[in-house]
Amino acid sequence: MEAWLVKASDFIGFVKGCNHPLPEYIVVPRIVKGSKTWSAVHPRLAKETPCFDFPVSVAGPSARFLSPVDAAQRLRRNCASGVCRAALELLDALASAVGWDSVGVTGSLAYSPEQADDIDIVVYGYGKVLEAYRVLAELRGSGLTRPYLGRGHAWSREDRLLHAKLARKRLLFGVFQGYEYNVRLVTCTSPAPCTRVRSLGHIEVRGRLCSALGFTTPAHYMLCTTGGHRVHIVTYRLRYSELPLGVMLEVRGLRQELCGRELVTPDHGGYIRIVGYGAGRSH
């Protein structure tokens, strides 16, 4: 599922999402022929699937997969660096609330822990992610973590401006024992077959954020426009997480149709921009 490590002959990447063209899985590359990449598609793995109407990278059963839970257990058996020890301490704090079978590591700690310089964690299960978010709030309230004020990895100018306005209240990003961390809270616990999504072109919408489940991956938002319409926003990118209720947004994204419902995702060539503030709290 989301954040599982996948290895092939010249490729290291991560599974993206919980819905896939089974028995193949949608993946995003991270290391190609020994070099790090932020491209969303690996040319050799790109193909059209029932999930989208444009090519995405997929990996089949012949690839090697490693769950974040197993990666964390492997890290526990061989932990020599400062970032590794910090990661295990943060994992322990989360596992005390959700159990070790629901929390693990992804990112460089999963594929090259000896070279890692930041902490990527994932938690699975709807009830578990609620508890994990509570723990992150307690850690921030006690001063054990600090806000992340950096520029992100491969973020656009719009992404950096958005984070600058939200950084001090964000819990999924932070700094723990001097190391940058991020936490993905994934509600699903098993993969499912995807349903075809039809792309309807890019669109820009403005409105007030009137409903939010913004701390999960994917995050779900409802934008109430001035014309009285409600627009469903879905994103898998942490940079668009934890948006506060009541804020006025401009969203550019890909308009898609899924099972007769329309949604907009900024993940493909889009952005989210704060254009004003109103009443409300995030939840």
Image (cartoon, rainbow, N blue to C red):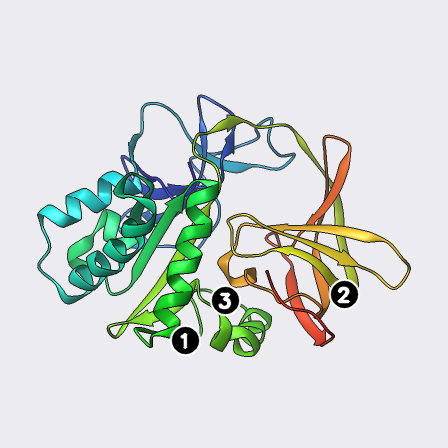
Whichever of callouts 3 and 2 sits on the residue coming sooner in the sequence is 3
Label 2 crowd bin: few (<14), some (14–19), many (20+), radius 10 Å = many
- Examine the rendered structure and indicate whether residue 252 appears above or below residue 104: below
Whichever of callouts 2 and 1 sits on the residue coming sooner in the sequence is 1
- Examine the rendered structure and indicate whether residue 254 appears above or below residue 198: below
Name which residue type carries label 2. Answer: Arg
* Left or right, residue 192 beside residue 137: right
Discs 3, 2 touching: Cβ within 8 Å: no
Q: Residue at x 28, y 49 (%)?
A: 95
Label 1 crowd bin: few (<14), some (14–19), many (20+), radius 10 Å = many
Picture disc at residue 155: 3
The span from disc 3 to disc 2 (Cα, nearest Å) is 24 Å
In terms of depth relative to the viewer, which is nearer, 19 or 186? Answer: 186
Quadrant in the rendering for residue 2: top left
Q: How many marks?
A: 3
Q: Residue at x 20, y 52 (%)?
A: 112
Label 3 crowd bin: few (<14), some (14–19), many (20+), radius 10 Å = few
The residue indicated by pointer 2 is 208
Name which residue type carries label 1. Answer: Pro
The residue indicated by pointer 1 is 147
* Left or right, residue 283 beside residue 226: left
Quadrant in the rendering for residue 280: bottom right
Residue 124 in the image, given as x and y percentages of width and height: 40, 42
Residue 278 in the image, given as x and y percentages of width and height: 74, 75
Picture disc at residue 101: none
In terms of depth relative to the viewer, which is nearer, 5 or 96? Answer: 96
In the rendered image, the residue lying farthest to the right is 227
